[in-house]
Image (tube, coloured by chain):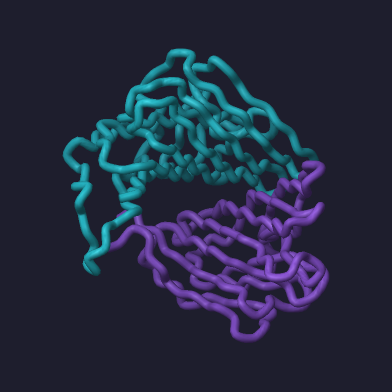
Amino acid sequence: MLQDLALTQPSPFTESKDNMATTYEKIATTTLSSAAASIDFTSIGSGYTDLRVVLVGTTSNNGNVMRMRFNSDSSSLYSWTELYGTGSAAGSAGGTNSASINISDSAAVGTSSTIPHFFSIDLFSYAGSTFKSCLITASEDNNGTGAVYRAIGLYRSTSAITAVNLFAATGNLNAGTTATLYGIKAA
Amino acid sequence: MATYTLISSNVLASSAASVTFSAIPATYTDLVIRASIRNTSTTSITRIRLNGITSGYSARSLTGDGATASSQTQSTAYLYSGELNTSSTTANTFTSMEFYLPNYLSTVNKPISTIASTENNATTAYTVAVAGLSTITSAITSIEVYVGANAFDVGSSFYLYGISNA
């Protein structure tokens, strides 16, 4: 599912009714009406300071790993370091020179095909010319098993991020999965 | 409609064992509670109930205490929402807690994310991240934040925000 934002990009000078600048805005949202391999936000403008992605959903198979790329770039420019808890043990893992960033745990239970999991990605200074880092949160409780997940991801590109690609390592995102892209302004 | 809107707030002028946000409007997508909280006595945790329901919760927590990291499975009678600064921690230090409930109007199980920290410039403090789940399949109309024992201290503050993706 691809959502082009070129025609929906708000003015950076948008003001709310009380005449204060709006600092937290929805840019786009997608709810899958049928299973899809990915949710893609494209043509993201540079009018914000940071981006936030909130994803709630399920995958076509259990134990999957949710992943993220930027700008549809599958080169080995990604890395991440994760901290997770399974309810009985804490652990840390990660990856370097990877083709994507894991936004859910790869060592515990992974995704569910029936119970929605929550993911959020805070992407800082996405339009800048330095490498891009992001803070990732995942709540993956399956009512008896599950994992809590926090990670920091890095995209070693100096290009502005204009697209965010969310997908499962294998299979599809199920119908009903929802992703929303927010923009946060510092000015 | 603004994207991120304050729905209600409560700053305690006297100690209280719980704070309840009720009659939450069905006009947002996600709910967030941001709280600055402290217990009146020596030991406690923060708990949350949805719609007054006392069963059907599940949670895994990840805890760091300044020396080690560990993970726990939490009660099914409430949503465990982290440790709490108490009267035995440094004076005037309050726990910062954020509780995020996406898709609170949905008719399926609801995932929940919480993070709390009791940093107090002492050897031991707790940072706790929680992955929670509610099996309530109706819209959430009330949220009760309460302590495991004793009460929230004077000055504790609770802010409920609605986030809209409309």
Of the pair A53 and A14, the residue shown nearer to us: A14
Residue at x-position 45% and y-position 65%: B161
Q: Locate residue B160, reporting x and y percent.
A: 48, 68
Q: Is residue A163 above or below residue A121?
A: above
Asked if residue B51 shows in the view, the reply is: no
In the picture provided, is A54 more to the left or to the right than A10? Answer: right
Colour in which chain A is drawn: cyan
Q: Quadrant of residue A96?
A: top right
Residue at x-position 34% and y-position 23%: A159
Q: How many marks?
A: 0
Q: Which chain is purple?
A: B
Residue at x-position 47% and y-position 17%: A77
Q: Locate residue B78, reporting x and y percent.
A: 69, 64
In the picture as drawn, the residue positioned furthest to the left comes out as: A7
Q: Quadrant of residue B118?
A: bottom right
Q: Quadrant of residue A20?
A: bottom left
Of the pair B2 and A38, the residue shown nearer to us: B2
Residue at x-position 71% and y-position 49%: B61
Q: Is residue B47 above or below residue A31?
A: below
Q: Locate residue A157, reporting x and y percent.
A: 41, 21
Asked if residue B75 shows in the view, the reply is: yes
